[in-house]
Image (cartoon, rainbow, N blue to C red):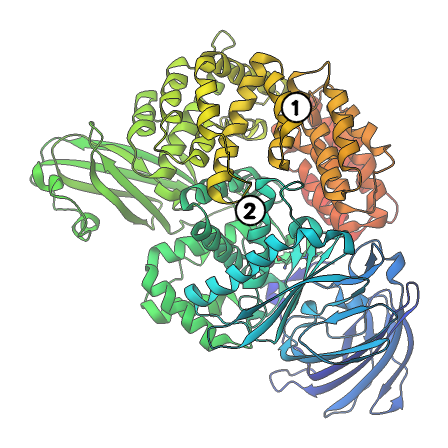
């Protein structure tokens, strides 16, 4: 059954308040609800419907009188009074057998919940939609020492606790936790002087992994006050770490629940990348308190209203805490790796989808990451100051609302007097726009009027007016058809450009061109010589730039560009071109000129090591497959793998003499800190270690493996040993396991590394072998992703010509679907790019997808995903 945005109707009944009582028992938890309903004056219909799934209804009453509702697998209907009334119901549920991890379930002996998007209905009967908001009072009864819910603690006694959340909220933000937990406490004083109690709750053995998360929380609270003027609004803020969790984390009001991998950290067990991700997710969930909770979504089609904005906010936070250029480049790498294939394949959908079968399938890179890009474009177009005023107005006007994208855009229109009708296409039109660029240089043309855009730029330096030449950039935009959308209208594209003189001076600093038409030209007058363009600075719009710059121009930008993003992009383009050259003409080796130039930049000690590490990274195999596909060439996964390896090998040999000096420069002698400075050095160090290991067969890596006092370096050493020391790698893998067998999060890394670093011919066997390991646990999403997800990430291994990778994954997806549809459906997306490949591979993938589709009792989640991928 498909749900459509256009069918939205307001709820017939609103909720004034909710009282819930939980009597916890693993297989027979009793939930009683008392809900005060009032007619919604905005609605015409009076039908009374409550969502409810997999519930055993014990009894229900209206205004104290027993009633017999009509119950279906989706919910119930009942005759109700015309005016306000009190609904009471008692249901029974079984958290212990809930392997879907939706609703109330158990994880390592603790009770916890996940209600977003539509799982509160697995806890009790309720209007489970985000536009029904109410204050909640919750009583929990159990023998467990810690019992938590949303809001503030009201009272507690032997075997019970009561919580009250004064802020009205939709049911998806409800949370409950109970268990044998210990806390890492702290406190925060808000800008108006209120004292807030903070806690991170964990299983007893994890208490030493909470300090970093707590610091990240306090930094987030401070940042949101300083940058957005947003203050926290309860007496207490609790975070709980849970081992079994489908996603990263959840922003339940006052009680954030986290996948333990997204909050627990220690130097010995977590990598620098883990620390950075944890800091970002803690910020993200905290920021939801305003963008998500205080202002929520009217319906699930508006998901990007809270997710796009909150991702945008957490990326701003990370840029402020760490390095803005490094964060921007990392975000673009991620966007291209995850969102572009989605936007250009069978799963393509608008940032605000118009229909769905299962909303959990729309927690996507498009809604989240492209949703954040859209906000970044909006901010660039209106300017920082107008953005700040628009956000103030948004918080003032919509506090307490369940809002829409229309509401969001309206605050920008009201603050700026801009008409955002065309800009709104970013929310409704799917697909990645292609942007073609041509340039024209007219040495002297006095007849041309000065460009409006340039005239408006007071920053333009004097050199611009020094000559009489005109430089014109002509852009053409085109978005290929996507499922359900044949014809595309032009989008508003903010294109940031700079112009450089041939000797490397910036003749026109970053200027924003606002493209609104299918084809549009922008001229720069008064130039003395033909400039070199630096286009799409900061990746100012999420498009594919279709411009084949010459190698000379790219080398020039790599050496001279003043914008850190486009400088990196030049390096990326050179790497891509070199690999493409070798792939299309096997007689060609790596581009030596590029490798020489890159060496110069990477040895520049003035540059941030983290940035240099990004310059060094070659596009991944999956990205190369996508690049070939975009050029009409069928990618050969084995050839991509060997070409990329040949490039890495040639570079290591060419740079051999420089490696010891580089390694020395980035060596960290101070005690471990997971900050940007040290992490950057270790990131560059890991790239250097990889090159060294290719030459010394793992000697340096073995030393690092034995002596490292932090997981970042232990793990990067182990990766090199698996790659380059075939003889001894089994021993190192065993040693690592023996050292860390009691730490689940580290053992996840152990599973993952063996699959992701396996050679293409061994990856499927490695994954299959690990599924037989006693520590493999189909019910734990982290472990499943570490094993089977890692296989899909090993591009050449997954796409092995005999189809062993596809078959293994399909087997396990079929098994997992019975237990956990949401995680299964999510992983089906690894098949989305299947039409890129040759006919044999397509046939193999198709037959495996059809095998999944044919599974008896296939979940709605997976049925929708497989159906869309095959369509
Ligand atoms: N709202 C959460 C976040 O982005 C994501 C949780 C969604 N969970 C789900 N089952 N769809 O922080
Ligand atoms: Zn979120």
Residue 565, horizontal then vertical, whole percent: 38, 38
Write down the residue under mark 1: 796
Q: How far apart are marks 2 and 1 (CA)?
A: 29 Å
The image quadrant where one finds ligand 2 is: bottom right
Q: What element carries label 2?
A: helix
Q: What element carries label 1?
A: helix
Q: Is residue 617 rendered to the left or right of residue 554?
A: right
Q: Residue 337's image quarter?
A: top right
Quarter of the image that includes the N terminus: bottom right
- The single residue placed furthest to the top in the displayed view is 587
Residue 745, horizontal then vertical, whole percent: 72, 43
Q: Is residue 349 above or below residue 663?
A: below
Neighbours of disc 2 within 10 Å: few (<14), some (14-19), many (20+): some
Task: Give 326 or 489, whichever is nearer the viewer.
Answer: 326
Which is more N-terminal, label 1 or label 2?
A: 2
Q: Is residue 248 above or below residue 597?
A: below
Q: Which of marks 2 and 1 is in front?
A: 2
Residue 741, horizontal then vertical, whole percent: 79, 37
- Residue at 80% over, 40% down: 813
Q: Which mark is residue 276?
A: 2
């Amino acid at each position: 059954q498909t749900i459509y945005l256009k069918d939205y109707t307001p709820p017939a009944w609103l909720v004034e308040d909710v009282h819930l009582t939980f009597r916890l028992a693993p297989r027979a938890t009793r939930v009683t609800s008392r809900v005060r309903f009032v007619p919604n004056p905005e609605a015409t219909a009076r039908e009374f419907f409550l969502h409810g799934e997999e519930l055993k209804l014990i009894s229900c009453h209206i205004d104290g009188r027993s009633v017999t509702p009509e119950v279906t697998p989706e919910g119930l209907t009942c005759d109700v009074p015309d005016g306000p009334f009190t609904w009471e119901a008692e249901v029974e549920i079984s958290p212990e057998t809930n392997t879907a991890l939706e609703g109330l379930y158990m994880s390592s002996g603790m009770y916890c919940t996940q209600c977003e998007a539509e799982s509160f209905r697995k806890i009790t009967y309720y209007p489970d939609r985000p536009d029904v908001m109410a204050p909640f009072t919750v009583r929990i009864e159990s023998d467990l020492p810690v019992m938590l819910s949303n809001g503030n603690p009201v009272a507690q006694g032997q075997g019970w606790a009561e919580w009250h959340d004064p802020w009205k909220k939709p049911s998806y933000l409800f949370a409950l936790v109970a268990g044998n937990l210990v806390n890492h406490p702290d406190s925060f004083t808000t800008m108006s002087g209120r004292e807030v109690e903070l806690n991170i709750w964990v299983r007893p053995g994890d208490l030493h992994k909470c300090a970093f998360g707590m610091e990240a929380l306090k930094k987030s609270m401070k940042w949101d006050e300083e940058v957005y003027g947003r203050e926290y609004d309860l007496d207490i803020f609790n975070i709980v770490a849970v081992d079994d969790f489908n996603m990263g984390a959840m922003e339940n009001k006052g009680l954030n629940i986290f996948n333990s991998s997204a909050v627990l950290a220690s130097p010995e067990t977590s990598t620098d990348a883990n620390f950075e991700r944890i800091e970002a997710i803690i910020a993200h969930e905290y920021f939801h308190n305003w963008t998500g909770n205080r202002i929520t979504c009217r319906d699930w089609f508006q998901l990007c209203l809270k997710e796009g904005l909150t991702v945008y906010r957490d990326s701003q936070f990370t840029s402020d805490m760490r390095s803005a250029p490094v964060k921007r480049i990392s975000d673009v790498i991620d966007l291209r790796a995850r969102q572009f294939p989605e936007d250009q394949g069978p799963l393509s959908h608008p940032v605000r989808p118009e229909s769905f079968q299962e909303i959990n399938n729309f927690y996507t890179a498009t809604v989240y990451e492209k949703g954040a890009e859209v906000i970044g474009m909006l901010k660039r177009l209106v300017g920082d100051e107008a953005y700040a005023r628009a956000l103030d107005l948004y918080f003032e006007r919509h506090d307490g609302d369940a809002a829409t994208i229309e509401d969001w855009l309206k605050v920008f229109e009201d603050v700026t007097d801009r008409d955002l009708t065309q800009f709104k296409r970013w929310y409704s039109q799917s697909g990645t726009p292609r942007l073609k660029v041509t340039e024209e240089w007219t040495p002297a043309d006095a007849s041309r009027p000065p460009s409006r855009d340039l005239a408006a730029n007071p920053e333009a330096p004097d050199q611009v007016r020094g000559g009489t030449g005109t430089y014109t950039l002509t852009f053409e935009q085109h978005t290929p058809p996507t499922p359900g959308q044949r014809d595309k209208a032009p989008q508003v594209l903010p294109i940031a450009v700079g112009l450089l003189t041939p000797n490397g001076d910036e003749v026109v600093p970053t200027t924003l061109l606002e493209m609104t038409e299918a084809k549009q030209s922008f001229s720069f007058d008064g130039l003395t010589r033909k400039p070199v363009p630096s286009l799409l600075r900061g990746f100012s719009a999420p498009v594919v730039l279709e411009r084949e710059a010459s190698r000379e121009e790219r080398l020039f930008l790599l050496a001279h560009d003043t914008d850190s993003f486009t400088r990196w992009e030049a390096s990326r383009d050179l790497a891509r071109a070199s690999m493409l050259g070798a792939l299309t003409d096997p007689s060609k080796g790596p581009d030596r000129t590029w490798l020489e130039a890159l060496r110069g930049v990477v040895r520049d000690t003035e540059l941030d090591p983290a940035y240099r590490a990004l310059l060094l990274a070659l596009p991944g195999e999956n990205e190369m497959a996508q690049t070939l596909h975009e050029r009409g060439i069928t990618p050969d996964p084995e050839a991509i793998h060997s070409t990329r390896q040949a490039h890495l090998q040639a570079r290591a040999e060419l740079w051999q003499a420089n490696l010891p000096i580089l390694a020395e420069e980035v060596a960290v002698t101070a005690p471990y800190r997971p900050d940007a400075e040290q992490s950057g050095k270790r990131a560059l160090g890991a790239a250097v270690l990889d090159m060294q290991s290719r030459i010394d067969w793992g000697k340096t890596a073995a030393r690092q493996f034995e002596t490292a006092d932090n997981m970042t370096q232990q793990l990067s050493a182990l990766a090199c040993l698996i790659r380059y020391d075939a003889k001894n790698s089994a021993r190192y893998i065993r040693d690592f396991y023996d050292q860390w067998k009691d730490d689940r999060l580290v053992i996840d890394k152990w599973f993952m590394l063996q699959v992701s670093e396996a050679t293409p011919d061994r990856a499927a066997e490695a994954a299959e072998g690990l599924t037989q390991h006693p520590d493999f646990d189909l019910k734990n999403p982290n472990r499943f992703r570490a094993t089977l997800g890692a296989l899909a990430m090993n591009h050449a291994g997954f796409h092995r010509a005999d189809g062993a990778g596809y078959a293994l994954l399909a087997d396990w997806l079929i098994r997992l679907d019975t237990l956990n549809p949401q995680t299964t459906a999510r992983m089906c997306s690894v098949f989305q790019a299947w039409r890129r490949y040759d006919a044999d591979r397509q046939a193999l993938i198709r037959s495996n997808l059809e095998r999944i589709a044919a599974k008896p009792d296939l979940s709605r989640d997976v049925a929708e995903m497989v159906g869309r991928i095959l369509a």
